[in-house]
């Protein structure tokens, strides 16, 4: 009997992961990707001896990548290897306060209390609560489809129900942090920052996001051997060896749907037929350009995008011993910064600056005596702003801030530069408005409005990726691929 066939549209991390899992469950799989390489938002750029990962820089839950590769190969280390990074982040405030955030909860809590003031036990208690929230909800919100009634019959849901009132669904993350951490503004700002993990505002996203700090400190941050872009490369190599067929430079024009059933796809005027199609393209873009025979669901139309970013990739001809792999230079008024991003939809004039320096871990990423700086600020998704002007302003704001806080002349140290803006992110990946994480989680019920992993009226049509349940960021994309592949395996067409 011939094997069942599945077509995957898009080779972002979730598309690559779904392809591996489908192959592992016995499907013949073909992946069609518009770009010339796998990875989507996880790109790479090199210049003058510097190497940069152009997309994600912070990596948590690496076992999800391992588990995915393990669906087709028993020895995952042939493809993918990583190390735990001892510290989570180095934080800088304008008044000169600096905090090296240790990876371990107890070390971090002691150090944070010492440097920022506050009580070690209060911080430890915050982490205990975050860990409990993660354990209570992951089986419900992160590992299963929220849109199938079967989910609501599982043990995990029944275990979570009595804990619902304590999950922070009815207050914002900022309100919750203030309640738990008191009037310690720096500590509250540090924990508010975790809202940006999925492109949201701490003043709007629900308190349940407290659980995110558990990923960074309770479980840890990691760095893949070869850099972040080795994540999609590893999955691609594992897939090729397992017999998945990849087509690059192949922009899918249409997903064919007839009489409530998926029939296949059209690429370059040719039809490729299959009863199962997994769409890894940003859903708003997919409904607009690929699924033109069916209406865009109302919940997708009304969704607000997550934040986007302006990123400067700078080759810096100096080393900075006080900087680490992840560094954050906070703004003085976090509330005004998030208002600018989400309400005014513009640039804030004192943005929080994130600098990632992978050469701190892998010296080969920069020439000797130099560092590769990935310098990012959060900005709104594109809605027609003048990005040339905003990018010029952003560079000036960033340089002014870093000159002040690091006491250097940053501009004179830049040997090579590249820039990524929201319209460029959209143009490269079809992510609407250049949103980094699909839709924002600024609404309490956002998780329920996100696109389900399947289409409820079209059989054989599935979705995975950052704009789909359970959301954006590498770990959730990996989970979305798993949920989607499991749904397909349990509903063979
Ligand atoms: C600058 C930046 C920083 C980030 N930082 C982090 C971080 O530190 N940690 C973290 O976990 N996450 C981070 N993220 C988010 C993370 O990158 C995304 O959530 C994740 O990579 C999205 O993967 P995806 O599978 O949804 O697909 P995408 O990466 O969006 O890829 C979709 C793919 O579909 C392809 N495609 C589109 N249309 C078509 C078509 N018609 N035919 C064929 N192919 C098509 C595109 O070319 C693309 O390759 C960041 C993102 C960016 C941009």
Image (tube, grey):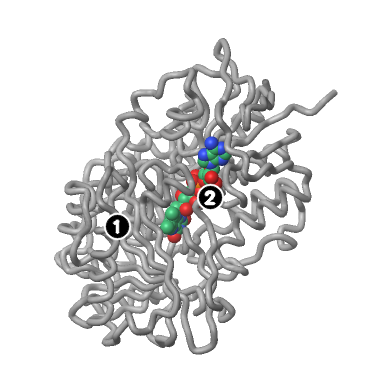
Label 2 within 8 A of ligand 1 by Cβ = yes
Residue at horizontal 36 percent and vertical 64 percent from the top: 376
Residue with the most extreme right position: 1
Q: Secondary structure at mark 1?
A: helix
The disc, 1 or 2, on the residue closer to the chain's N-terminal end is 2
Image quarter hosting the C terminus: top right
Q: Is residue 413 visible?
A: yes
What residue does disc 1 label?
388
Pinpoint residue 96: horizontal percent, then vertical percent. 22, 83
Pick whichever, 468 or 190, lies toward us.
468
Q: Is residue 227 above or below residue 304?
A: below
Q: Please give the count of numbered marks on the rendered protein.
A: 2
Residue ID at (74%, 47%): 72
Give the side of residue 33 with respect to residue 206, left or right.
right
User: Residue at 71% of width from left, 58% of height from top?
Assistant: 76
Q: Is residue 349 above or below residue 261?
A: below
The Cα–Cα distance between marks 1 and 2, rounded to whole angstroms, is 23 Å
**Disc on res. 86:** none
């Amino acid at each position: 009997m011939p094997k069942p066939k599945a077509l995957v549209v898009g080779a972002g991390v979730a598309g690559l992961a779904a392809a591996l899992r489908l192959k592992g469950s016995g499907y013949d799989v073909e992946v069609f990707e518009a770009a010339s390489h796998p990875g989507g938002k996880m790109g790479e750029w090199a210049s003058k001896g510097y190497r940069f990962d152009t997309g994600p820089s912070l990596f948590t839950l690496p076992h999800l990548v391992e588990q995915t590769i393990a669906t087709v190969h028993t020895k995952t280390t042939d493809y993918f290897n990583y190390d735990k990074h001892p510290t989570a982040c180095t934080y800088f405030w304008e008044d000169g306060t600096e905090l090296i955030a240790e990876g371990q909860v107890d070390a971090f809590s002691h150090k944070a209390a010492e440097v920022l003031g506050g009580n070690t036990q209060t911080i430890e208690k915050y982490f205990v609560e975050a860990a409990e929230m993660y354990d209570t909800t992951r089986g419900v919100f992160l590992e299963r489809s929220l849109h199938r009634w079967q989910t609501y019959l599982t043990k995990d849901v029944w275990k979570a129900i009595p804990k619902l009132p304590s999950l922070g669904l009815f207050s914002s993350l900022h309100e919750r942090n203030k309640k738990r951490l008191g009037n310690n503004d720096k500590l509250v700002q540090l924990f508010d920052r975790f809202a940006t993990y999925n492109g949201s505002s701490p003043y709007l996203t629900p308190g349940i996001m407290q659980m995110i700090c558990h990923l960074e400190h309770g479980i840890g941050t990691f760095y893949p051997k070869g850099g972040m872009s080795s994540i999609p490369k590893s999955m691609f190599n594992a897939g090729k060896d397992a017999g998945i067929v990849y087509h690059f430079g192949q922009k899918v024009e249409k997903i064919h749907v007839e009489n409530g059933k998926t029939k296949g796809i059209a690429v370059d005027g040719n039809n490729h037929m299959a009863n199962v199609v997994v769409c890894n393209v940003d859903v708003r873009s997919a409904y607009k350009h690929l699924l033109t025979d069916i209406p865009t669901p109302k919940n997708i139309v009304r969704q607000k995008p997550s934040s986007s970013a302006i990123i400067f990739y700078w080759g810096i001809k100096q080393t900075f011993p006080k900087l680490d792999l992840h560094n954050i230079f906070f703004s003085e008024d976090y509330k005004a910064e998030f208002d600018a991003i989400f309400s005014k939809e513009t640039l804030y004039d004192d943005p929080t600056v994130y600098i990632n320096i992978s050469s701190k871990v892998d010296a080969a990423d920069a020439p000797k005596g130099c560092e590769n700086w990935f310098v990012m600020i959060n900005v709104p998704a594109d809605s027609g702003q003048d990005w040339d002007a905003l990018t010029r302003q952003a560079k000036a704001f960033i340089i002014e801030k870093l000159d002040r806080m690091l006491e250097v002349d940053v501009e004179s140290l830049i040997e090579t530069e590249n820039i990524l803006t929201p319209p460029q992110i959209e143009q490269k990946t079809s992510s609407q408005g250049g949103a980094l994480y699909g839709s924002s989680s600024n609404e309490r019920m956002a998780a329920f409005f996100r696109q389900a992993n399947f289409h409820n009226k079209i059989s054989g049509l599935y979705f995975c990726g950052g704009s789909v349940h359970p959301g954006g960021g590498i770990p959730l994309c990996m989970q979305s691929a798993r949920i989607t592949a499991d749904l397909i395996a349990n509903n063979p067409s």
